[in-house]
Image (cartoon, coloured by chain):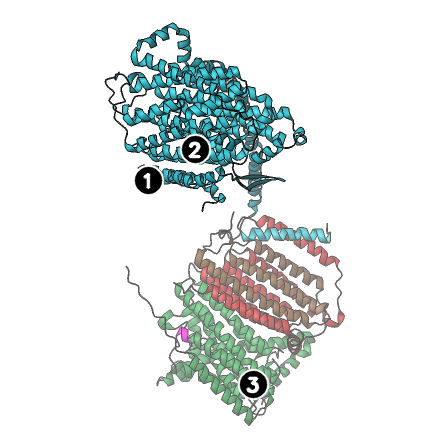
Amino acid sequence: MNLIPLNHILIFSLALFGIGIYGILTRRNIIGILISIELVLNAANINLIAFSKTTSLSPETGLVFVLFVIAIAAITVAVGLAIVLALYRSRKTIFADEVHLLKW
Amino acid sequence: MDQLFVNLKAWFLNLLGLFLPDWLVMLASIVVSGVVILCLGPFIMMYLTLLERKVIGRIQNRYGPNRVGPWGLLQPVADGIKMFTKEDIIPAYGDKLIHLLAPIVIVVPALMVFLVVPFGRNMTAVDLSIGALYFLAISSITTFPIFMGSWASRNKYSMLAGMRTAAQMVSYEIPMTLAIVPVIMMSQSLSTGAIVAAQNGLKWFVFTPWGLVGFLIFFFCAIVECNRPPFDLPEAESELIAGFHTEYSGMKFAFFYMAEYMNAFTLAAIAVTLFLGGWQGPLFPSWLWFFGKTFALIFMMIWFRGTFPRFRVDQLMGFAWKFLLPMTLVNILVTGFWHFNPGAVGWGVSGAVLVGFFFAITALNRPFVPEKRIYELAE
Amino acid sequence: MDLLQLAIKTGIYTLMAGTLVFALGVVMLKNLFHAALSLAAVLIGTAILYLVFHAEFMAAAQILLYVGAVITVIIFAIMLTEHIAERSIIQRNKQSLPALLGVLALLVLIGKVLLKTPWPVNPSTLDARVSVSDLGVALMGAYVFPFEVISILLVGALIGAVVIARKDSRP
Amino acid sequence: MVTADWIYLVPLFPLMAFVVNLLWGARFLKNKAAWVSIAASVAACAVALPICVKVFGGARFSNEFVWLTIGSGTLRFGYLVDPLSASLLSMVTIVGTLIQIYAAGYMAGDPRFSRFFAYVSLFMFAMLTLTIANNFILFFMAWEIMGLCSYLLIGFYFEKTSAAKAGFKAFLTTRVGDVGFLIGMLTLFATLGTLDFSEINSLLTGTSQARLGINTGLLAMSALCIFCGTIGKSAQFPLHVWLPDAMEGPTPVSALIHAATMVAAGVFLIARSFVIFMAVPGTMPVVTTIGCVTAFMAAFIALTQTDIKRILAYSTISQLGYMVTALGMQGLGAGTFHLITHAFFKALLFLAAGSVIHGTHVQDIRQMGGLFKKMPHTALTFIIASLALAGVPPLSGFWSKDEILLTAFASGHSLVFWTLLLTAFMTAFYMFRLVFMTFFGKARDPKVHAHESPALMTLPLWALAVGAILLGIPGSPMTHHWFQRFLAHAIHHPEYHPSTFVMTCSVVAAISGIALAGIIYLKNIHWAEAIAKTFRPLYQLSFNKFYFDEIYSRYIIRPFNAVGAIFFKFDASIIDGAVNGAGTGSLWIGAVKNWIDQHIVDGLVNFMGTFTRLLNSIVKRLQTGFVQNYLLIAFLSFLVFIIWELKLI
């Protein structure tokens, strides 16, 4: 760990986070959005582990949190994709900008 | 004899150490073990194919391949040469990149698993502290190439087969993982070496009730993981031609073929380490015990291939979710019980619980009666 | 010895760079399947990064859970819906410019914050190795409540997902 | 045993008859209605006569109950039966019953038969209440109801416009009198503080110092005003015009109301309030002169009249004049005695005239003649009554008229005596002119073929004839003026000894009148025209009833209408103008308000509407429906938040 200064890791995760956000905002395909969400969560995980390794008092807290984050990610993907399937079956499209029933 | 190979490697390293800086020597040891695995893998795969064809032949009351070399020993070499020389077709509308990438991605994990397999006393390549988990993680990656293969070839049959294989492998991964849990509970550690050490002196886990059940479940899951019959539905010839690797020919197909057999070998090896005491054995050198047990299991697999008819898809899935999964959960329960009072009492109670639960689940799983179709006549 | 370290360091940086490239791939790639695979690559990259942090269990868990389960489900979803999306359809909607600007601004801002704040590096934890058993104890000890909640959440979510995605059996 | 308290029943029986006839008359009773009202009046007789006999024996009944309490004062109604009201009571009930029996025959076949008898019963009720009333208010209420009944009965044949006009005229003229009467009553109440007869008597006949406190001037005025009521109701000099026209009504009505009872009510009023007149002697000459003038004038007009009922009407007016002059000369007994006797033979005369008209269907005596043989009963009773009226002894008329002449002579009113004597002569002349022209001589009009009336009509004639003959005795000297003493025992007034001179004068006047009539109208009829020509102006004057009607219409009605027209114009132009002006004004205000409401209020509301719509169109752009837009907005706002919070820039 002492090989790499903490800041670099943070920058790296920040970059990942930014790319993820950009992906969420621009991807037309809903599954694309879901993937980008995974990316964002992953960036968070990196930070968690980096901090648990360097600063936190009890090192295992970060790790436990990473486990929980992974569980949450799994849940989001499962529910998200169920919705995508239902959407696809009913509206024959999975493009976010085509699903605009609530448009004024 | 036992430490033959270990001493051989130590000797070689000292030889190198004479004229190389020590970090280079470390590197060399890594390289050596790497090379050994890389050679061992394909070699085993080749002779597994031969063994399988010989045994299936014997089962079908015929000789296996015996034309090429004495008793057909060179047959794998011939196959290899055939694979090399065959024309390599790439589907036109397929996804070229993914198409080429698929065989690589399937072989690499197969080889990576060898890392944690303890061939003999202190003959494991890298004794990771999370050996078992590593094995599980790597085996879970094998679903990817199947997707890539079936998707890249852009034809309906491979797509369908890909979906089925993936579903099948994902469903059986869970019982396999849970089957390992009792072993880890009892051996207090994830690393394969520790697990084998926990089984020394004929205290193989298989001789415990939960061990037996765990072994059987793990063995079934292993067979399914590497798509061997009777669970080889996806690339069943009669239905889906060659399943997800229909479009592959030549060397790419060889990779798929090799990955399949290497998976078979590693799964058998892991089964042995977890349940059959790995290289523990009274008389013979540790690695001999290990290879003996592993080939015994492989023989079992080939035997299965020759005897059992193929499973239907829904039976396959139902078997995993509705039977294996509950059994593993109960098994974990029983090991908890066993941990506190092993021996005769343990056998009695856990045996009763397991058998009782077995019949309970089979009773629960009423045979699937397809929904009665209501044909509305066109008005 | 520093040579080895140097090698490792360069290895790590290239790993990070590669992960970033794959991350961009996830966002930029037109073909969704490629995006999913590049996501798998990113996840594997981060798993390796965890190894650097000596969090082997995390790496293995990440690969097993994330790559094995999550990505598989995503690819299932893509397979089920992909055939309608021809390659030609543009995959990015029109608000990419403002989003880009926003993200860049975010990066700049938080970057500044990160660089400016002096993170208190606790030397004792640097070389502490968290073994799997410590994790197990923590999970079952201090964090048993979140653990139970997560399990309930998982069950609920999965059942919900099944209900939503189930083909409507009602006529 | 009939006790005093039954007296209430006397007026109530006719009232019940009225109600029965009114409600069920038309549909159920039809021509049986007559028996209902006759039964009621017979019952009234059965109750009233025993009481009167008791009163004749010296008894006196009076009782009252509290009708109304006004603040501290209370209004008490009740009955007072003293000699005066008892005599009148008996007269009214007997005559009323006989006339109703006669009317049953006379009105047979009339489509509004039951309604006629309802009105008659109502009249009987009013007359009886009037006679027994114990205070002026109850008296005045009965007085008004009688006025109403006279209007209804005069205008009974309302199809004929003349009848309707006559009814209207009668009602209005009596109304004028009634107003005077009301004012009199009010001033009386103002001065004496009470309207109860017995209380007034006790106040005015009491000791002097009680009387000193009373304001005599006001009392005189109230007496005169009360006398106006009599002038109106009893058809005295200025207000007598309505009586001749009242002959439009059916003959029994004329008999009952315009001969016997109603007109007598006026005289009865003066009798009732005689004490007031006594208390203020100054008013007496006024009464006398009015009475005397009326008597002479009416008799003079009657000379030249040709309609049988008009002649009798004028004779009634002159006889009333007699009674009023008697009362004016403080001859209470004489006046009332003449009232009673006159009621009988005048009713008889009218009924007989009625049967004549019933037989010949003609009212003009110039078309009649020689009816004696065809209608013997009617003729005989008619002749008896005429003799009584003319004052031929021993009939009742002679005694009562003689009493009045005696009072006039004895009290020194020589002028009055001689005019009354002349009037008596004229009365005798026109009565027998009538008798000879209708019953004797040749039938002048061949179309007229008379027939005798049925028994139902002739019987009451004979009953009345008996009354006419015998009733003179109680008041005659033979019984020592029992009647006058009976009447006046309470009020002391001068007693006069019968003088032979007065008797002889009156007999001479009567006989000469009859003889003159016989000479002219039996033998040489042409003398009549000759006299008429010689005294042309006098004849015209008499024939046209002193042109009273014309005078009234020109000098009273026309100016009255003119004033009315002026007021109408004023009302139409100014008041209506004001009202219309208010209307249009509010219209204008409404219009202005409408404009304001339309433009300003609605404008405001619409503005609110459009403003919100505008706002809406701006804000709704935000809802693009794209999930990622919302995310972008969230993200950018998050950025802004960070910049703001952490003050990075």
Disc number lying in front (3 or 1): 1
Subunit under mark 2:
D
- Residue designated by label 1: D29
Quick check: A36 above or below D257?
below
**How far, Cα to Cα, is label 3 from label 1?**
124 Å
Which of discs 1 and 2 lies nearer the camera? The answer is 2
Mark 2 belongs to which amino acid?
A: Met
Q: Dot 1: within a 10 Å radius of its alpha carbon, few (fewer than 14), some, or many (20 or more) residues?
A: some
Does the magenta run of residues contain A87?
no
User: What distance separates the C-alpha of mark 1 from that of mark 2?
Assistant: 29 Å
| Dot 1 and dot 2 residues touching (CB under 8 Å) | no
Residue at the (59%, 70%) spot, across then down? C150
Q: In the image shown, does D313 or D581 lie closer to the viewer?
A: D313
Crowd around label 2: few <14 · some 14–19 · many ≥20 (10 Å)? many
Mark 3 falls within which chain? B
Magenta residues?
Answer: B310-315
> Can you identify the residue that label 2 sits on?
D91
Q: Residue at x 39, y 10 (%)?
A: D539
Name the residue type under label 1: Leu
Q: Which residue is mark 3?
A: B335
Left or right relative to D156: residue B2: right
Q: Residue A15 appears at what percent x and percent y? A: 64, 58
Q: Quadrant of residue C148?
A: bottom right
Looking at the image, is D577 positioned above or below residue B71? above
* Chain (green): B
Q: Amino acid at mark 3?
A: Thr
Mark 3: few, some, or many residues within 10 Å (few <14, many ≥20)? many
**SS state under label 1:** helix
Q: Is residue D145 above or below residue B83?
A: above
